[in-house]
Amino acid sequence: MQPQQLAGPKCGRRYEKEYLNKFRDCITFYRDGKVRFERFCYGEGACFVFGAWATISPEGALSYTLPLDPAADPQALPQALTGVEGSTLYFDGKRPKWQLEKELDADPKNGYGKLKMALLRVRGK
């Protein structure tokens, strides 16, 4: 599947991993082919733990931008998209589902403001 198909027609799509542990893992696919993994804590002290930028190949392999954040857990990062069922993704041949959480019009905190999105659309990305 092409990265633009995973991102959808707007700025991008954010997928959330089904709840299995104390973390909330999200992965966002953007129209320009970039991918952002983010991990957050659950509970009263909910906070951002770490994030990592990546690209995805047409075969589904994720390549992360190095060096990773010192707080990053390399074991937590999905390595390859291995299945797609409607709006649900599967990574690394494992059971946890990543379900579509949100269609994004813009994502300014990660550098995808409305102006950048307009420019990407004009350029056909």
Image: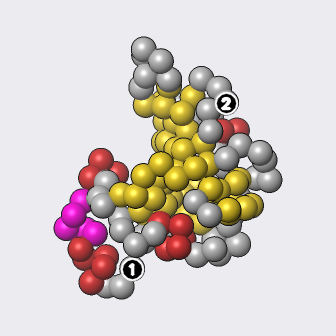
Few, some or many residues within 10 Å of mark 2 (<14, 14–19, 20+): few
Give the numbered dot on residue 66. none
Specify which label sits upstream in the sequence, 1 or 2. Answer: 2
* Residue farthest right in this picture: 93
Would residue 27 be visible to someone looking at this image?
A: no
Few, some or many residues within 10 Å of mark 1 (<14, 14–19, 20+): some
Stretch of the chain drawn in magenta: 112-117
For the N terminus, which image quadrant?
bottom right
Q: Main secondary structure of the magenta part?
A: helix
Q: Is residue 80 left or right of residue 117?
A: right
Residue 107 in percent (x, y) is at 31, 54
Give the numbered dot on residue 125. 1
Q: Is residue 19 above or below residue 116?
A: above
Instruction: Name the residue type under label 2.
Output: Leu
Q: Residue at x 42, y 52 (%)?
A: 102
Instruction: Name the residue type under label 1.
Output: Lys
Q: Which residue is mark 2?
A: 20
Pick whichever, 80 or 99, lies toward us: 99
